[in-house]
Image (cartoon, grey):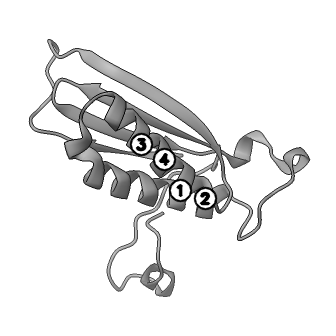
Amino acid sequence: MGGTAGLTDGGLGSQDRLLSADHVTLVAAPTAAACGRAFVRERLARWQVEDRADDALLVASELVSNAVTAVGFGDRVPRAREITGRQVIGLQLRLVRADLFVEVWDGAAGLPEPCCRGCRASCSGPGGR
């Protein structure tokens, strides 16, 4: 499944229009978060909204890392023949008016399950699925 984070200055209305959008496809490997951050840095510089970089980099890195945990190859880099559609992660940026959206999706079958404080022992670890 996936996650979306909106780094906004206000609400979206029906009159808002898309200013810029781009996406990248990543393999769910240990290098995916770094590649995702490079993509975010480059696109925000191209769109001249570098002031959003710190927040967008943090959000993209966390969401991509969660996706790698959910569908990835652990700590190893896979061989090309091992990669299936399930191990592919999408990262998309959309700039609508003054609002930047960071969206990530993966090939996991179920919905992400957020952790709540103290509800399960597994929730004490990193990640947010």
Q: Dot 2, crowdedness within 10 Å: few (<14), some or many (≥20)?
A: many
> Which of the two labelled residues, at mark 2 and mark 1, occupies the earlier sequence position?
1
Disc 2 residue type (three-letter): Val
**Image position of 110 (left or right of 62):** right
Q: Is residue 108 visible?
A: yes
Residue at 46% over, 50% down: 37
Is the C-beta separation of discs 2 and 1 under 8 Å? yes
The Cα atoms of the two marked residues, 4 and 2, are separated by: 17 Å
Disc 1 residue type (three-letter): Ala
Q: Nearer the viewer, mark 4 or mark 1?
A: 4
Q: Residue 40 carries which label?
A: 3
Q: Dot 3, crowdedness within 10 Å: few (<14), some or many (≥20)?
A: many
Q: Which of marks 2 and 3 is in front?
A: 3
Q: Residue 33 carries which label?
A: 1
The residue tagged 2 is: 68
> Which of the two labelled residues, at mark 4 and mark 1, occupies the earlier sequence position?
1
> Which of the two labelled residues, at mark 2 and mark 3, occupies the earlier sequence position?
3
Q: Dot 4, crowdedness within 10 Å: few (<14), some or many (≥20)?
A: few
The residue tagged 4 is: 38
**Image position of 69 (left or right of 63):** right
